[in-house]
Image (cartoon, grey):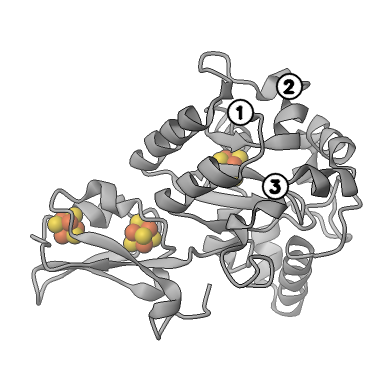
Amino acid sequence: MKHGAGGKWYLNARHYSEEIARKHNLREFLLEQYKNFEQLPVRRVAGISPVGLGYKLRIPLIGRIVKATAERLLASRRPPSNPFKPEGHIGQVVPLEDAIAILETCAAEPIIQKNCMCRYMSRGVKEACCINFGVMSEIIDRLPRFIPEKEKYHLSRAEAVARFREFNRRGYIGTIWFGPYPYINNLCSCASPECAGLRPRVDYGIMSIYKAEYAAGVGAGCTGCRACVSACPFGAVEFDESTGRARVRAEDCFGCGVCRHACPSNALHLEPRDQLPALAGRY
Ligand code: SF4
Ligand code: SF4
Ligand code: SF4
């Protein structure tokens, strides 16, 4: 609310501006960060090594301290200072409609697509599904290992929308990121559990990413075909035997909207989170 001047923070064009990039010297900062990107996951953060993080998080008192430290770093609103810390790198799930609004109205040029490093570092595959803007795109120009070999690299706004739409139909989860705060430069199409932003939230409850401004609902047209049950990347949809229809468990829904692509009856829709009493203000 604060960063969106009362609305959605990622639709505030100021966060994509050259003014912000210059003020925080982000050309130098991001180049240093991405030159050394593969080393970041093995560095200690606030004295804590991420190796064996799952085990550390389960130790009673230590686990709480590690979790609180990680959340404080990720949601930090201090000016970016250390390119080797994941500081101020917080994101939110966005459905297709909001991603299109970002690409058409807010994203700073140049716009590129680069190889997803989460997939590369966890599965060894290079898939060009991170869409970058502004200063981030300029940095990648100088780092060939992030540049896709086969696909087009620099994109027009219309091409970026088409690429994002294609990823979303494939079931990838749309996410938008401060990288670092207060600059927005990444619109990602993530896979769970590979995504280093989603996994801490899904597996360990660390607030590394917020749920979308929406949650899914099932309409009267549902025929009970169950296609959405397997399509939901968060396991938030179940088949309700008593009604013979699908049911979304609201508390588990991230509002990504990808279940809609699987529905042959167009029976799934997104509702604004703040209009759902049980979910309002809960991200
Ligand atoms: S945030 Fe998502 S798209 Fe971006 S690098 Fe990670 S998994 Fe890939
Ligand atoms: S039910 Fe929610 S979390 Fe699952 S795909 Fe649909 S919108 Fe995304
Ligand atoms: S895919 Fe659509 S019709 Fe099939 S169970 Fe889900 S909501 Fe119902």
Q: Nearer the viewer, residue 104 or 85?
A: 104
Residue 237 percent coordinates (x, y): 28, 64
Q: Is residue 226 visible?
A: no
Q: How many marks?
A: 3
Kind of residue indicated by mark 1: Ile
Q: Name the kind of residue labelled 2 in the image.
A: Asp
Of the two numbered discs 1 and 3 on the same chain, state the one appearing first in sequence. Answer: 3
On screen, residue 45 versus residue 215, left or right, reads right
Ligand 3's image quarter is: bottom left
Residue visible at 63% across and 67% down in the picture: 206
Rendered location of residue 28, percent (x, y): 89, 36
Number of the front mark, 1 or 3: 3
C-alpha separation, residue under disc 3 versus residue under disc 2:
18 Å
Which quadrant, please, contains the N terminus?
Answer: bottom right
The answer for how far apart the CA atoms under marks 1 and 2 are is 9 Å
Q: Give the residue drawn at x 63%, y 65%.
A: 4
Circles 1 and 2, Cβ within 8 Å, touching? The answer is yes
Q: Is residue 251 left or right of residue 197?
A: left
Amino acid at the residue labelled 3: Tyr
Gap in angstroms between the C-alphas marked 1 and 3:
15 Å
Q: Residue at x 48, y 63 (%)?
A: 212
The residue pinned by badge 3 equals 16
Disc 3, disc 2: CB below 8 Å? no
The residue wearing badge 2 is 141
The quadrant holding residue 164 is: top left
Residue topped by disc 1: 112
Q: Earlier in the sequence, mark 1 or mark 2?
A: 1
- Measured as percent of width and height from the top left, residue 74 is found at 74, 61
Q: Residue 68 at what x, y percent from top left?
A: 74, 73
